[in-house]
């Protein structure tokens, strides 16, 4: 008799529990949709005491998982500057991905003059041992808890010191990031053992005056040279990733046009790819960006970094 009563009670409780779970899911979707209604507005999250700016693409559908791109600013910069000056929000609108701009470690109010601990570089983040790999993981987790994103399509890109960080993320967080793309920031790790082969794109100008193409810190790298490092060259950075990803095929030209070229290394383990894109001019900048710092060379227009990065990420997500 007790078994019968228990079975009856259970049969009554299960539909109620299912209905409650369905209600929770619907409420979550409505909340996500309300957030999506603020498309075009940079939304702010706080993660481990730092600001993260999040841009939802126009037409964002809260019921469908979207790709997620984390974009890391350069050393001495901050999240807002990268969100406003690199064209990534416009690219996100066109391509349909969520883009987030985390802020680096800073001891100043408002998070200005922030840096990333990419291993050998840079600034206070490196000197104080900021755990920016764990921070990046926490940022992804916080965004996934708030917005519907696809865990199989999480990517990272970065400029200069931020580019160095994404090389480190490829080394230490390949379980989270499907592919990474660095601009004007070479590998600064001393040890790198990725948990799996990972697709890596590197973009660099030959006339970069900060992170020199053939290695070393240029005269404009940082006023205090102790805050940077003897930067690894672009060829050495690519050679490291070709070895780590166990690529066997010789590089093939994927793009060859006046002022820019790209080479792709294939035949890598697990279908990964390593790609290098080089502009002849542009200095220490984001190719295709309209932003230009006072007294600095304008960014190259021979290559659009956002287009190349998103194309590379799309290819990686299909592997």
Image: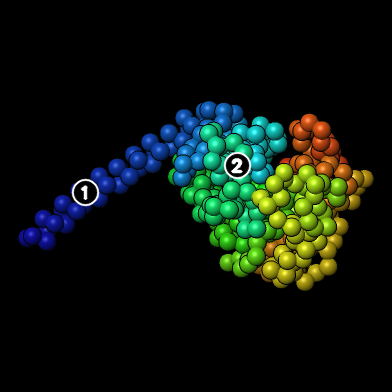
Query: Could one spot residue 298 in this view of the protein?
Result: yes
Q: Could you tell me which secondary element the residue under label 1 belongs to?
A: helix
Relative horizontal placement of residue 306, taking residue 67 as reference (left or right): right
Mark 2: few/some/many CA within 10 Å (<14, 14-19, 20+): many
Q: Give the side of residue 17 with respect to residue 2, left or right.
A: right
Q: Quadrant of the N terminus?
A: bottom left
Q: Position of residue 150 (x, y in %)?
A: 54, 49
Query: Is the image coloured rainbow, by chain, by secondary structure, or in one colour?
Result: rainbow
Residue 51, x across and y down, in percent: 52, 38
Q: Which mark is residue 13?
A: 1
Please give the name of the residue rendered at 34% of the width and 39% of the height, measured from the top-left corner. 23
- The residue located at (40%, 38%) in the rendering is 28
Q: Position of residue 88 (x, y in %)?
A: 67, 38
Pick whichever, 7 or 259, lies toward us: 259
Residue that appears at 19% across and 53% down: 10
Q: Where does residue 21 sit, x and y in percent of width and height? A: 33, 45
Q: What number is the disc on residue 114? A: 2
């Amino acid at each position: 008799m007790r078994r019968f009563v228990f079975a009856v009670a259970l049969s009554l409780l299960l539909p109620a529990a299912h209905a409650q779970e369905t209600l929770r899911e619907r409420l979550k979707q409505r909340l996500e949709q309300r957030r999506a209604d603020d498309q075009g507005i940079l939304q702010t999250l706080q993660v481990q005491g730092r600001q993260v700016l999040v841009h939802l693409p126009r037409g964002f559908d809260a019921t469908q998982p979207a790709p997620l791109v984390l974009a890391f600013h350069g050393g001495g910069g901050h999240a807002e500057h990268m969100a406003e000056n690199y064209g990534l929000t416009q690219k996100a609108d066109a391509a349909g991905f969520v883009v987030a701009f985390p802020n680096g470690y800073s001891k100043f109010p408002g998070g200005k003059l922030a840096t990333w601990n990419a291993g050998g570089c840079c600034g206070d983040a490196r000197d104080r041992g900021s755990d920016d790999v764990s921070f990046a993981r926490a940022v992804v987790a916080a965004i996934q808890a708030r917005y519907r994103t696809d865990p199989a399509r999480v990517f990272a890109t970065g400029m200069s010191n931020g580019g160095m960080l994404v090389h480190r993320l490829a080394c230490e967080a390949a379980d989270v990031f499907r592919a990474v793309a660095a601009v004007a920031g070479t590998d600064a790790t001393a040890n790198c053992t990725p948990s799996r082969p990972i697709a890596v794109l590197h973009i660099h100008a030959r006339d970069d005056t900060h992170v020199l193409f053939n290695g070393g810190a240029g005269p404009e790298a940082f006023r205090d040279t102790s805050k940077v490092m003897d930067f690894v060259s672009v060829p050495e950075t690519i050679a490291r990733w070709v070895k780590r990803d166990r690529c066997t095929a010789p590089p093939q030209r994927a793009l060859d046009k006046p002022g820019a070229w790209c080479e792709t290394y294939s035949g890598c383990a697990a279908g990964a790819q390593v790609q290098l894109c080089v502009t002849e001019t542009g200095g220490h900048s984001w190719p295709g960006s309209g932003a230009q710092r006072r007294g600095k060379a304008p960014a190259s227009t021979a290559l659009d970094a956002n287009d190349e990065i998103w194309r590379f990420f799309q290819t990686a997500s299909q592997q």
